Image (cartoon, helix red, strand yellow):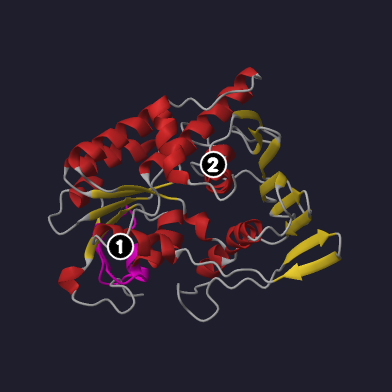
Amino acid sequence: MTSTGDGAGDPAACIRVGLIGYGFSGKTFHAPLIASVAGLDLRAICSRDAGKVGADFPDMVVHRDPQTLVDCDDIDLVVIATPNETHAPLARAAMAAGKHVVIDKPFTLDLHEARDLLARAQRHNLLLSVFHNRRWDSDFLTICAAIEDGVVGEVTHFESHFDRFRPEVRDRWRENSGPGSGVWYDLGPHLVDQALRLFGLPDTVQASLAIQRAGAVTDDWAHVILSYAERRVILHATMLAAGGFDRFIVHGRAGSMTKRCADRQEQQLLGGMRPGDTGWGEDPDPLVVHDAGGTWERPATAGDQRRYYQGIAAALTGTGANPVQPIEALVVMAIVEAAIDSARTGATVTPPLSDRERAETIASLSPRLA
């Protein structure tokens, strides 16, 4: 695997990238995506397992201490793919060293940390972005295009599911008790970000979280309802759904549609495919539509998560916008936090945003659906 991007031009023009964390997210997503994008040069990785890094990038510089990577003069952009509780402190350290920052989701543990990082990035005039890569999944792009084209008319009911069958609790930080663990912190930010892209800021949030598996110590079931006047958006995640599930269910005034299978890019990466290889992001599972004319199918749109890092490269070279604006990441955390408060109290919660944050959110999100 190379680390200079497809067709990268003058090496001096490349954004020099340091990746902190080479666990599941860093190894599976960030490193191969960064390495595939022209204009990005993956220079160093921070990991306690140099052999694991070397197996994929034989000539890679490996640091054991995140601070030594952050302090490197030949790093422009620091990508943070570490346990959730370390996101904010590592981002603060990187920005203090004058580095641009990409953080894996969730942005932070809470809204307070998110606000602090936004203020620091603005104060130091640094790019700050969050890796909401699921915006470029085939299933979501397919649903977005169908809604924009009015396939089912005005949407009244929208369901988005990350339902999996993993009945055995694994010994990993995401499933251990601790800050930022549990299925809602793990998958909720993806579900929330996609809903915000389609419908904008909800009026209220109502949620229920549960621990259902034997031996589990943090939530492994989440059901969240976002209300937009009379429209309802349901976000659901569970680890006890066997036999398959519909990724999206949409009802509208002119019909209904379902997208059965999820995007395949994660499976392609785990199987050894490199981003951009033949078949990358292709989705053979069609959108199924039911309307007054009967039942028909619409081909799926191909996904391509490289577009996130292509956007980062463009933003840092002045040729495009940050693909995930900091205010968009902050409002995701506001919804995540509102859902946790709702689940704890049983109350319906209004997203805890200031008037200024609400105005910035409305301006930035430009929902696809009024």
Residue holding disc 2: 200
Precedes in sequence: disc 1 or disc 2: 2
Q: Is residue 125 positioned above or below 285 on the image?
A: above
**Amino acid type at mark 2:** Gly
- Label 2: which secondary element: loop
Q: Residue extending furthest left? A: 73
Q: Residue at x 22, y 42 (%)?
A: 95
Q: Residue at x 34, y 53 (%)?
A: 322
* Closer to us: 96 or 243: 96
User: Residues in magenta?
Assistant: 35-62
Residue holding disc 1: 314
Q: Quadrant of residue 235?
A: top right
| Dot 1 crowding, Cα within 10 Å, few <14, some 14–19, many 20+ | some
Q: Is residue 293 positioned above or below 245 on the image?
A: below
Q: Is 61 left, or right, of 112 in this rendering?
A: left
Question: Which mark is on residue 55?
Answer: none
Q: Is residue 150 positioned above or below 99 on the image?
A: below
> Whole-percent x and y of residue 141?
58, 61
Q: Residue extending furthest bottom? A: 278
> Whole-percent x and y of residue 224?
65, 35
- Structural distance between the alpha carbons of marks 1 and 2: 25 Å
